[in-house]
Image (cartoon, rainbow, N blue to C red):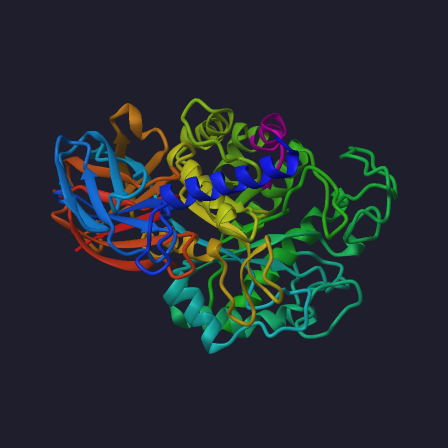
Amino acid sequence: MPYCMWKSISAILIFFILFSCKKSDDQSGVYITPLISLSDSIVSANPFSYKFIANTGTALTGLSYHWDFGDGTQKDGASLEQHNYADNKTFHVTVTVTNGNATPAKAAVDISTMISILLADSSLKFQTIDGFGGFGGQSEWWSNGPFTSTAFINDLVNDLGVTIVRDELPTNFENVNDNSDPYNTDLTAYNLNNQVAGSHQPLGAHFQFMKDAKAAGINKFITAVWSPPAWMKTNNSTTNGGNSNDPGYSDTPDSTYNQLKKTDYEEFAEMCVAYVKIVKQQTGIDIYAINVQNEPRFSQPFESCVYDGPAFRDLVKTVGDRFKYEGLTTLIFGPEDIGYLDGVSSMVQPLLSDPVSRNYISIVAVHGYALDGLTANSPDAQTWQTMYSWGAQYGKPLWMTETSGYSNDWNGAMDLSKAIFTALKQGNVSAWLFWTISTQILDQYSLMSSLGAKSKRYYASKNFYRYIRPGAVRFSLETSTADSTSIYPVGFYNSASQSTSIVLINDNSTLSSVKLKGVGIPASFEMYVTNGDPAKNCVDAGIIQSSDNLVLPPSSVVTLVSK
């Protein structure tokens, strides 16, 4: 047979087959097998009820739908169906779509009604919460502001729920020595308003923000020193002096070392006294606690000063003695170290092993960078447990006073939520503070911008900040089933408000169902949900009964507050 004739006959045969076997719409006469997908969504969990939608790829007519709901129930129905299911099972749901003229199209989906049990025991108690918060005002102290506004304070206190503000003692506060006698403090000689090259805003720029925050209800203001003034230091600089070798601490430093002169420990203590007194005079605020040095173990390119454990201990003793002499109630916290566990230990142990410094250090504070392990036996969780144990034997709470670096998206918000959970659950921390609450440009180092733009990390933090209030005591709340390994619960009871708050993180990519059981569970809760949905920003999801099955959306942070 000639090639051209065979080619023509083949084309006719292929056309005939396609024309005959494809599903038909009524106008063209061509049979078209529908493209189909099957979606599901949960309607309720009491009982479990799912809605299914069979979606065809084109607008076809005359279609019929046969459903197999996976529990022995089959029916002919429509493109949208709803079906109820028993608890604690999985089901394979299938829909078959045809108009009787072509090969039927099928689609399937698996659903689960498995329930994770969360066991509560309110008689088993852990740490008491001092608060949640972060550093700074509306804009960075190294910017030109604004530093406060009505809208910002409202966001900070009434929306996010901040109860602790961390501030800095500006390096230009005592830019020159007030006088040569550290026990003759001239409060008029300290710098409140003059800009100094190479320094952040002077202390006076902080006052209105502090007063506004206090008026809105914040009563814990803590302060850290980033560097003593240059004249107190061996390198005559508030930074590392441009030394590329970054030497560590030395008992016999030369001018290359970024250290406080031992001969100026008393002058440093006087500066701290002046700071506390002037803040009280100007704002009416009693500084709750002060740290004599932020991240003291190593030099940094920004304002910093280096100590080893014994030097830090001796400075705490000097400042503590002076506070006692002055009758100041401001506590001392620290060392706010960062890095590997042995390094942090080298700063904390000298403080706690000396009875004088142990008496003066009221709070063991660390920075929580890269401590995100979730399970109790993870290295990060064990680090938190170890750090808590240092102070716990002496009745010293553990605070996490700085972290950041979480990506400005939902993944970053989930990572931040899990980090908070780990610190609360494994480290028994009594306070959690983010690095910068607000910056002019919203980035991984802030929760919001000075113009009011809020990140998902802001709303995930709100699930903790807003609903776990100072005075709340953590109680035992544990998952009891093997399939709940990616659900992370933490619960608190506040006797002052007689309120129970439970935060549940669902780290699964699918929805998960839980049921609360045990001792001390209230009858009902208001539910607040944050997830990757742009509209789900700590949104009120209504009242749920504690006896009901509770559905957690995929990859979400859910807070329950007793009603």
Outermost residue toward the bottom in this view: 150
Q: Is residue 402 above or below residue 533?
A: above
Residue 451, percent across and down?
Answer: 55, 72
Most foreground residue, 436 or 321: 436
Residue 74, percent across and down?
Answer: 14, 36
Instruction: Place residue 347 in its image quadrant.
Output: top right
Query: Which residue appears at 84% of the width and 48% of the height?
Result: 235
Relative side of 216 to 521, left or right: right
Query: Which residue appears at 26% of the width and 34% of the height?
Result: 477
Quadrant containing the N terminus is top right
Res 106 seen here: no
Residue 326, percent across and down?
Answer: 53, 56
Res 448 seen here: yes
Relative side of 209 to 343, left or right: left
Magenta span contains residue 486:
no
Most foreground residue, 536 or 160: 536
Report the span colored magenta. 336-348
Magenta span contains residue 346:
yes
